[in-house]
Amino acid sequence: MKQFKIGTSWIRGVVGNGLTAELVTDFACAYGTYVGGREVVLARDTRASSPMLGAAALAGLLSTGCDVADAGVCPTPAAQYLVRSRRAGGGIAVTGSHNAAGWNALKFIDEEGALLNSVRGEALLDLYHLGEHTKASWDRLGKRKEAAGYVDAYLADTVGRLSVAAIRAAKFRVAVDLVNGTAAVAIREFLGFLGCEPILINAEMDRDFAHDPAPNARNMRQLEALLGHIRADAGFAVNTDVDRVGIVTEKGVALSEESTFPLVADHVLAGGGAVAVTNLSTSMMVDRVAERHGARIVRTKIGEGNVIFRAINEDAVLAGEGSGGVALMPVSRAFDGFLTMALVLEAMAAGGRPISDLAGRLPAFLMKKGEIPCSPDRVYHVLEEFRGFYRCEEVDLTDGIRVTWPGHWIHVRASNTEPILRVIVEGEDPERVERDFADTLFRVNTVVHGKS
Amino acid sequence: MSRIASLKISVSGVRGIVGQSLTPQLVTAFAAAFGSYAGRGPVLVGSDTRPSRHMVMPAVAAGLMSTGAEVVDLGICPVPSIQYMVAKTRAFGGIAVTASHNPIEWNALKFIGPKGLFLNQYRAEEVLDIYHQGEFRRVRDGEVRSVRRERGAFAAHLEGILKHIDREAIARRGFRVMVDCVNGAGAVATPELLAALGCRATVMHTSVDEPFPHCPEPIAENLQELVRTAREAEVDIAFAQDADADRLAIVSAKRGAIGEEYTVALAVKQVLKRVKAPVVVNLSTTQLVEDIAAAAGVEVQRTKVGEINVTERLLAVNGAVGGEGTGGAIIPAIHPCRDSFAAMATVLQLLAEEERSLEEIIDGLPRYAIVKRKAACPPERVFRVLRRIEETLGDGAAVDRSDGVRLTWERKWLHVRSSNTEPIMRVVAEAPGEDEARRLADKALVELKRCAE
């Protein structure tokens, strides 16, 4: 079966089996038509197929008459910054992001530097399906421009808006696992800017990924081992295009990827009265943190485009997801790994406390995540039937089914990337979580296999 | 109709108008088809100077890379240099991004196979079949190979040419030479060649980022500026290249544009001095080559129009020299392809050895007038047109039906065929006198139009 999926603000697939050069060309033509001939920023990650898909995107964009500002190997949040700073019409990032080797994707960036929201994503998709792209004549084709040399301006305009002096004064030693991704183009400048001493691993951009690039605890073992042996104030793991961050404490303990957002929120929301936006599958740690500061949490469908769009509409100060992506809304509309790392360092510097202490302040819940294979044509049937189990409780149908009780919730939804159903259960009572997790898996499995 | 006519997919490659038919989708898919055919490559990719190369080249690279082929990017590069490099580096093949002599809004892909020869009909059909089947070879992320940049193609090609040329003899004469590179791929190479041959050279239109100053086909009507400047400067000889530098026309300071047929004729004259082996030209080439070959005591063989047809015959019969009357001289010892640089060097050596002026050499050859016409013709009428031409005009002629129809009389011939690259029919007539040639061509044109309508 072909592995390919179209999302709100991206297309994603297995290279050579679903995601092809021709498909990327088509989408680039649709996107060039969508932005109406304005400049488009093009970025790519370090995957072997990214230059190939990047070339296809370049050809497609130029053919519609869009000039292309080619940022080369570039983190997605930096590309999002470039779209704004160049006043471009949009951007395309060729990156498999957190997906395993073998996958790749295009992320579509709007003129404000956010990933396309669902309205814009649908407009793009309509153009793609219509297939009638703008065709520029030979003298009106777009031109490719170099967009290198952006790192200093990007850091100054994003990270530079935090309390840099306080971070510099702390003289942190910071270990970063770059997973051989795009972070390498800016990590030394970033840590230098903040006066941190860098300890970098997997920093070669021309190598295969050292491990799966999603910055979760399972993939941070190398970083844990490193911090177990050498002294550092914090360890960070980023994914290929640096929109997600995972944290390892100074004691060499990897935190769950769910901890990044609440940990930053505990620092940013401290002012009080603010709004933060997250998705339905994110840990309720952030709800407790928000309560602590009198802030409000709004939940949306999964996906950076959806979360950021809602955050704009709610005038939120912070947006984030349990996968490790965080956006500081007044500064940028991107899940930005650099900014996220800087915010964690700022929190450490502000409180004068080690990161293990900050992590210790987070409420402790048990969260269980599971997945059940389910062919795409069965998903809605399964969800529909599964809904029948929960007549009385508070059911949210924004994205799959989320059932919430005080201090406890279950979320079952279709994956955005694979033909699977994801099951998440979280709560204060570990026994209840284990029990509900087992029950839910059993129930979903039963429905999937048609035995009721 | 204009939409249909703006795209031509044939064994010569795929050619279209940018902004209409030559889309990045089409280019990527064709490159993927060629990549599926080429295996792991390497595939050498180069372009002429058309502005649309900036869009077409990445589409070619993406298509090839998606099949796991190794791509070597030669940048702006004359087609004969791409062909030479494919052979020299034992690459699988190449893709030339060039619409050759077509106007600037066109672009095209030409497929080059092993040994640097264009794909012959059977190989080209295999690629077309893969394209139409749409099932391209796909590789996984980790198997996509990065593009290698190579900028030394012409240097290697020049070295290859100079091995077969008497540099000293040419340099001693210090020829005053003028060349019109039409801002094409020749611009990156021609000055180097002329410097190596010790010529006092004036090379015009070498700005590769500027549009063509005139239509890039090196025929008399496009060479007026060169004729005028060459006359004013009183150069020994002037040349004009097309956009991808495979074709060459010769201009005389005193006689003007003498016709692109003389390129092959003079190259044949020079090469046959040393090599006594057959000459191969296409059916539309001047009969001057027969006279020159007869004087040298070798035979002339004629093939269908199309570089690969001439080349394959040249290689099969171990021919000395040949080419196409449109200005494409082929000297197999250097490399069996149409090569404006090899032709320029060879003609200059002829001038050096003869110790006569270009005009004197031409005056020493029989004089023919060649007339070329073209007319639109619906594909379904082509066969009827050819039959009609043969029936009405074929009296007393030897008939050759291998490529359209060619009628040959004593010192006179007529060739009518459908173009490989455009939806038109071409008429070529040659006779000792201008009037006679024109009459013959016009008669054919009348019959053609009558049948086509």
Image (tube, coloured by chain):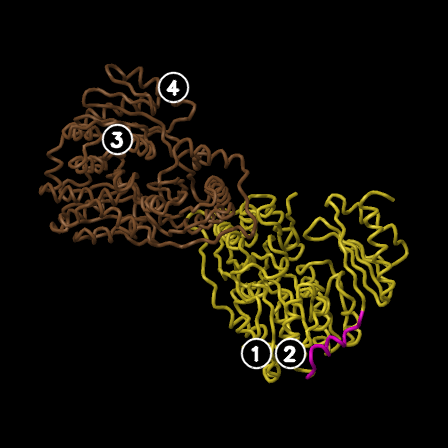
Q: Nearer the viewer, mark 4 or mark 2?
A: 2
Q: CA distance from mark 2 to mark 3?
A: 79 Å
Q: Three-letter amino acid code at disc 1?
A: Glu
Answer whether residue A89 is visible to the viewer in this image. no
Q: Amino acid at mark 4?
A: Arg
Task: Write down the residue under mark 4.
Answer: B384
* Magenta extent: A352-364
Q: Are marks 1 and 3 on the same chain?
A: no
Front label number (2 vs 3): 2
Pointers 3 and 4 within a single chain: yes
Which element is circle 2 on?
Answer: loop
- The Cα atoms of the two marked residues, 3 and 4, are separated by 29 Å
Q: Which chain is brown?
A: B
Q: Nearer the viewer, residue A291 or B308?
A: B308
Letter of the chain in yellow: A
Residue, disc 2: A233
Looking at the image, do the residues carrying marks 1 and 4 touch, with CB atoms under 8 Å apart?
A: no
Number of other residues with Cα within 10 Å of mark 4, as a class: few under 14, some 14 to 19, many 20 or more:
few
Residue at mark 1 to residue at mark 3: CA–CA distance: 73 Å
Comparing A248 with A349, the one in front is: A248
